[in-house]
Image (spheres, rainbow, N blue to C red):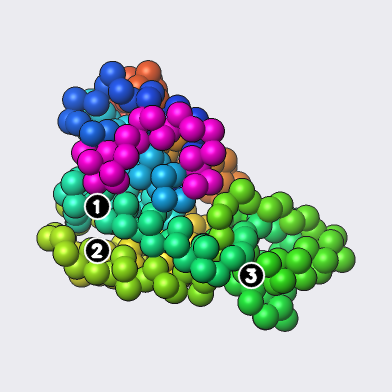
Amino acid sequence: MKVAAIFPGQGSFLTGCTRAWLADDADGVLSTVSDAAGFDVVAAGDEADAGRRTERGQPVIFAASLAAWRSLRRAGFAPSFVAGHSLGEYSAATAAEVLPLDAAARVVAARGSATAAACRQRPGGMAAVIKLAAAEVEELVEDIEGLFIANDNAPGQIVIAGDVAAMESARARVDALGGRLVMLDVEGAFHSPAMAPAVELVRRAVANEASRDPSVPFVSASRARVLQTASEAVASLVDGILGAVRWRDVQLLLERKGVTDLVEVGPGRVLAGIAKRTVPSLRVHSVAAPEAVREVMERLAGLAAAEPA
């Protein structure tokens, strides 16, 4: 039995996701992230639109994910790998001790602020393309100027990003091909050149913090491979601002590495749903609230005990 911890991105926001951990935050994660962000992540997590408001949503999701992670660790959780989707890669890097919590919180706050500013400078959007093959989506992107693949999440689900005109052209083309375009409720075209103004700001924010080699094998979402050094991990965090999230490849890599169980650490069950489509042989567990910690730990212990000696 081999377990990987996977951390969700901004799209997994749920109202109240930080408040859920308020009584189970022995390590002070919520206050640490609040100090770095310059606002109360618990109160912000109660705002229904915080997930869409990048500058607030990113620290909130990060705080909820790390509070869940610390609670799991106190319960004895020790995964063989960590990985994260988009913003979740920062959570994964923190879990792997590439950056200490306070430093990572400062970087995430800088990322949220910088990417929100980029959204305002270069308006655009994102959409999930449903029912089209990967080759068809790739052709779409090649044909429409200003359109890019942002996430390759699962078979039949690729997310595109682009400026307003490109997204309108994409909608017409997808309809004509018999697919479906589902617009995402986000501020801009993440994981595309529209985010270029944010790159240097985040690079400088990371450079100001001390980093170390991952203590747990850390899988890069933009490179879809295990990274061994601090410099590789930090570079991946910065590169991922523009680079596509290769989440399908990450899941397949974990499966090839012998992972049998995925634990989604943080709000929602978005990654769990994607995993069921991509790696159905893997068991998936979710920890979005404190009551799930004991349940998941007991389930994992039971599965481990049931394995042949």
Q: SS class of the residue under badge 2?
A: helix
> Could you tell me if the residues under marks 3 and 2 are in contact, i.e. CB atoms within 8 Å?
no
Q: Position of residue 170 (x, y in %)?
A: 75, 68
Asked whether residue 51 is drawn in magenta, I would say yes
Residue at 49% x, 32% y is: 47
Asked whether residue 259 is drawn in magenta, I would say no
Q: Is residue 171 left or right of residue 279?
A: right
Front residue of 234 and 112:
112
Q: Position of residue 32 (x, y in %)?
A: 21, 39
Amino acid residing under circle 3: Asp
Instruction: Write down the residue under mark 3.
Output: 163
Instruction: Write down the residue under mark 2.
Output: 205
Q: SS class of the residue under badge 3?
A: strand
Q: CA distance from mark 3 to mark 2?
A: 27 Å
Amino acid residing under circle 1: Arg
Residue at 32% x, 73% y is: 200
Instruction: Write down the residue under mark 1.
Output: 106
Quadrant for residue 239, please give it.
bottom left
> Could you tell me if the residues under marks 2 and 1 are in contact, i.e. CB atoms within 8 Å?
yes
Quadrant for residue 146, please give it.
bottom right
Q: SS class of the residue under badge 1?
A: helix
Residue at 33% x, 25% y is: 21
Residue 159 versus residue 262 in the image, above or below: below
Residue 123 versus residue 88 in the image, above or below: below
